[in-house]
Amino acid sequence: MKLGNGTEVFLERAGDGPAVVFVHGLGGTTNFYEPQAAALTGRHTVVRFDLPGAGRSPFTGPVSIESFADVLEAVLDAADLRSASIVGHSMGTIVVQHFAVTRPDRVDKVVLLGPVREQPAQGKEATRQRAATVREHGMESVADAIVGAATSEETRRERPAAAAFVRELLMRQDPRGYAAHCEALAAATAVELSKIEVPVLMMTGSDDKVSPPATSEAMFKELPSSSYEVLDGVGHWTAVEAAPQVTAAIRDFL
């Protein structure tokens, strides 16, 4: 679909009722949220889209967290939604944070899964190096390492299909788009969380090495109206690794 701002994205819409829009993270697509979308369509208008350069949305050039926020606004416009509850994962949570601060009138509630903020200097350098590796060697050069680091040992042992699905999401990415997303994440800057006044639900995994519980707890303390849950035995890919728990929490929160 070509949005009003001229950006072309793959977009899915289903259901009817109060709107919820899902924003995936680095290496994700609309399919990351399939369990949650399927459960919510009975009571909600559910909108999912692939960020530019990810999944089935074409790569057209440089991107940034701010440009992703612009796309999110254009998605709401295209879906004829005045406002919506917004769910983000990982890098997508930074997009949602920026969106909620800069367009507060368009946000009803916020869900942050594996929430992250501006990376420290060492993290930024590692993310930029990953971009360079992917550009030169393709997604296969990083996929297994990401699955090993970003899913929990319990998930890989007890729920191997979930870990395999994460690998498939990664392997299906356009290396150019994935590298550009890495660079957008590395360039991301923090927002003042205290400016997000709508209700916020945060969830992270006990074994999340990307967004460890301490990170989420620090963010939780800055948000004026929020709740926070840690999922035992779960890594960073929360909506896949703990699909029933995440789905139930989002449904109850909305």
Image: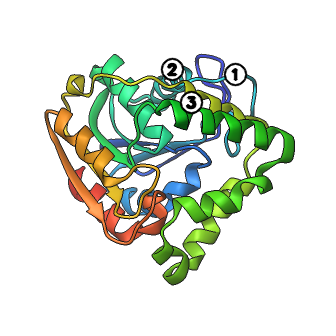
For residue 119, side relative to residue 125 (left or right):
left
**Residue 103 visible in the picture:** no
Mark 2 Cα-neighbour bin, 10 Å: few <14, some 14–19, many ≥20: some
User: For mark 1, what is the residue?
Assistant: 62
- Kindly identify the residue that appears in the image at 34 percent across and 23 percent down: 191
Q: Amino acid at mark 1?
A: Pro
Real-space CA distance between mark 3 and mark 2, rounded to the nearest whole angstrom:
13 Å
Which of the 4 quarters of the picture holds residue 2?
A: top right
Q: Quadrant of the N terminus?
A: top right
- The mark closer to the camera, 3 or 2, is 3
- Kindly identify the residue that appears in the image at 51 percent across and 79 percent down: 159
Vertical placement of residue 42 versus 223, above or below: below
User: For mark 2, what is the residue?
Assistant: 66
Q: Earlier in the sequence, mark 3 or mark 2?
A: 2
What SS does tag 3 mark?
A: helix
* Residue lying furthest bottom: 158
User: For mark 3, what is the residue?
Assistant: 186
- Kindly identify the residue that appears in the image at 45 percent across and 29 percent down: 76
Q: Earlier in the sequence, mark 1 or mark 3?
A: 1
For residue 241, side relative to residue 112 (left or right):
right
